[in-house]
Image: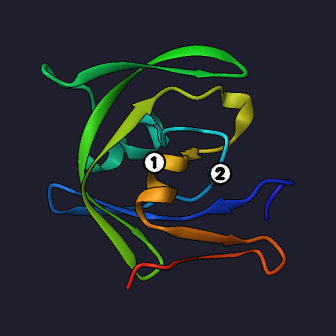
């Protein structure tokens, strides 16, 4: 728990490069995971011709994003392979690098233990 928000630090692998993203808010109210373009630029994740354009909706309104297939996402000991994530701009005042949404949480069978402030996968 940081700044009153549940946060995690998954590791992404994209085209042979790994990146751990800090300040990713665990958001069970978000249907899709959204990563900041600034947070993933260092490993070459950027918009390219042919990327799907999607619209993210939230309390702050709507934002155009692009969808990119990431080679793998690691959450603790669990990994998801060849997964599409939404990439877009986040308001600077938020001071976070994105939202970990239900798409990844449910895809990894994540259990959130709020009493202990831990999460784990039930997938073996």
Q: Are the residues at dot 1 and dot 2 in contact (C-beta closer than 8 Å)?
A: no
x and y percentages locating residue 37 in the rendered image: 42, 34
Q: Is residue 48 left or right of residue 45?
A: left
Query: Quadrant of the image for the N terminus?
Result: bottom right
- Using the rendered view, name the quadrant where residue 72 is placed: bottom left
Residue placed most toward the observer, 13 or 103: 103
- Using the rendered view, name the quadrant where residue 119 is placed: bottom right
Point 63% across, 54% down: residue: 23
Query: Quadrant of the image for the C terminus?
Result: bottom left
* Disc 1 versus disc 2: nearer the observer: 1
Please, what secondary structure does the residue beneath circle 1 have?
Answer: helix
Marks 1 and 2, how far apart at CA: 14 Å
Of marks 1 and 2, which one's residue comes earlier in the chain? Answer: 2
Q: Is residue 88 left or right of residue 116?
A: left
Please, what secondary structure does the residue beneath circle 2 have?
Answer: strand
x and y percentages locating residue 116 in the rendered image: 80, 81
Point 48% across, 78% down: residue: 76
Against 103, residue 79 (above or below) is below
Point 24% across, 23% down: residue: 52
Against 8, residue 35 (above or below) is above
Residue placed most toward the observer, 17 or 13: 13
Badge 2 local density, few (<14 within 10 Å), some, or many (20+)?
many
Q: Is residue 35 left or right of residue 84?
A: right
x and y percentages locating residue 118 in the rendered image: 69, 77
Badge 1 local density, few (<14 within 10 Å), some, or many (20+)?
some
Return the residue found at the far bottom: 124
Against 124, residue 49 (above or below) is above
Residue identifier under label 2: 25
- Using the rendered view, name the quadrant where residue 66 is placed: top left
Q: Which mark is residue 103?
A: 1
């Amino acid at each position: 728990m940081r700044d009153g928000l549940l946060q995690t630090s998954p590791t992404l692998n994209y085209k042979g490069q790994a990146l751990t993203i800090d300040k990713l808010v665990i958001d069970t109210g978000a249907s899709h995971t959204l990563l900041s373009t600034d947070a993933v630029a260092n490993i070459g994740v950027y918009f390219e011709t042919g990327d799907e354009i999607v619209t993210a909706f939230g309390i702050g309104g709507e934002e155009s994003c692009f969808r990119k297939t990431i080679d793998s996402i690691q959450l603790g000991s669990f990994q998801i392979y060849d997964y599409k994530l939404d990439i877009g701009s986040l308001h600077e005042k938020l001071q976070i690098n994105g939202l970990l949404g239900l798409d990844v949480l449910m895809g990894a069978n994540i259990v959130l233990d709020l009493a202990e402030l831990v999460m784990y996968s039930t997938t073996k």
